[in-house]
Image: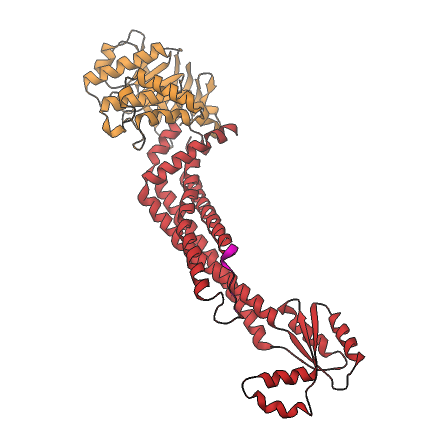
Chain colours: A orange, B red
Amino acid sequence: MINLVGVSKIYDNGVHAIKNMTLHIDEGEFVYIIGPTGSGKSTFIKLLDGEEIPDAGTVEVAGIDVGKLKFKKVPYYRRNIGVVFQDYRLLPNLTIFENIAFALEAIGENKVKIRRRVREVLELVSLEEKARCFPRELSGGQQQRATIGRAIANKPKVLIADEPTGNLDPEKSNDIMRLLEKINTEEKTTIVMVTHDQNLVDNFKKRTIALDEGYIVADMMKGGYIQHD
Amino acid sequence: MIEFFKTLPMHFKRAWNSVRRNFAETLSSVFAVTVTSILIAIFVIVGFNIGGFTQNVEDSVRVVAQIDLSVEGDKIKELQKEIENLPHVTSVIYSDKEEQLEKLIDNPQGGEGYVDFRDDNPLSAVFYVEPTSGDYLNQIETRVSQIDGIDKVFFGGESVAQMVSAFNSARLGGGIFIGALCLLAIFLISNTIKINIQNRKEEIAIMRNVGASNLFIKMPFLIEGVIIGAIGAIIPILVSIFGYGFLYDSMNGQFFTILFKMYAPMPFIYLVSLFLLAVGMIVGLIGSFVSVTRYLRWKR
């Protein structure tokens, strides 16, 4: 599903964010990306969703060479990928229902299908009751569930979660994790989750890829957080 | 393309929601369009009416050709034919010297003084030559004066020509002013849309994240511009419909003199309204297009 071969990325300011990275993630996998600040996690995500182009090597997602995509094709490619952010980023002027529907409207889905899929998603993320609420009326955990709902609405092949539990207390974080696991099994979505949360990584054991200074320093199938010096 | 039309109603809904939910900004640009459109309305109405005045003045001006006293009988008919055959002449009307004298006598201011001349009329008979347009007055004057048997030729002359040219330059000036106002409105609308784009940076980022195409992101802003323009045209349209109707009625359809006849409100004012609506919408579209292309910097 995700294939990186010899990928390097150097920013204009000289920061060498990713160094000669080779990585393979299978369809349906659930993978943690861990590492300290500045280890290249954000750049890794930007390479996956097509925002950045690698300076060397190839990034291939769902059979598409992301680095070679034409500018105009990027939005269409991005429909293969759902992104969840730490700070939710829901549209404040739209209700939860509208927020989730928005992702489907953006790709020209018809109304009936949108309504059916949004209900499905609301049920999946347990927000049926909150469909008519605006984001400000929801708790942090509920907002994050709504964001996840929006990200998976158009059935992306890959879900990237950028510190989805960063703003949540441990109990809510566990809820989110269980939700992501549910999506991973029920929707067969490949999940790449960037996190700082050691407890999560230890409690919900998954394949864990550790980055440091742009290198992959560990890739453990058994999971668990690694301590860096 | 099919996708484009399929999503169109939704874009309208989103644009309308944005108009409502960003009410303050919308109001400010609607106000800008309103003020501009009212001024445009005034200039269009005044401009067209001046055009009408010019037409009237030109229409009512004719060349008067005095026939030489020696020309009589059939020769007059021949002369008339000759003048009628000149280019840009619509009609030639003969008026004999008795008629000319009666006209003098009929003048309420001292006309009776001429009664004595009835026995020995010193006046000449004349042709009234009507041109197809006021622009040909000078040309016809010259041509007619060259014809044998014509004594003197005159028309309103310089003063009329000057009035016509003053009217024309007033219309030209009005046109330029309207153009400048449109530019101002475009600038104001594009500024509002720019603010809206800044306000919705977050929204645009999310749209991009969920894979919305560039056109999809642009559409609501473009439609919003058109809606703002259309709403902004409402008050000017009402003002011109009722204002002009009132002016027309209270002036009895003429501007101080019968020469300056105003356009009848129907259908003139509806055409003006349509024009204002079109101007508002086009101005709105251009304004938002300017902002959308300039301020939606696309990253990948």
Q: Return the residue nearer the eye: A16 or B172.
A: B172
Residue B264 among those drawn in magenta: yes
Q: Position of residue A102 (x, y in %)?
A: 37, 27
User: What predominant SS class does the magenta segment belong to?
Assistant: loop
Q: Is residue B43 above or below residue B60?
A: above
Q: Is residue B267 above or below residue B192?
A: below
On the picture, is A77 further left or further right than B131? left
Q: Return the residue nearer the eye: B213 or B18.
A: B18
- Image quadrant of residue B24? top left
- Name the residue at 32% across, 42% down: B23
On the picture, is A46 further left or further right than A222? right
* Range shown magenta: B260-267
- Image quadrant of residue A170? top left
- Image quadrant of residue A196? top left
- Name the residue at 56% across, 67% down: B54
Q: Position of residue A209 (x, y in %)?
A: 31, 14
Q: Is residue B297 visible?
A: no
- Name the residue at 77% across, 79% down: B76
Q: Is residue A212 visible?
A: yes
Q: Position of residue A110 (x, y in %)?
A: 44, 24
On the picture, is A109 further left or further right than A147? right
- Name the residue at 36% across, 31% down: B205
Q: Which quadrant is home to the N terminus of chain A?
A: top left
Q: Return the residue nearer the eye: B97 or B35.
A: B97
On the picture, is B148 further left or further right than B175? right
Q: Is residue A103 above or below residue A63?
A: below
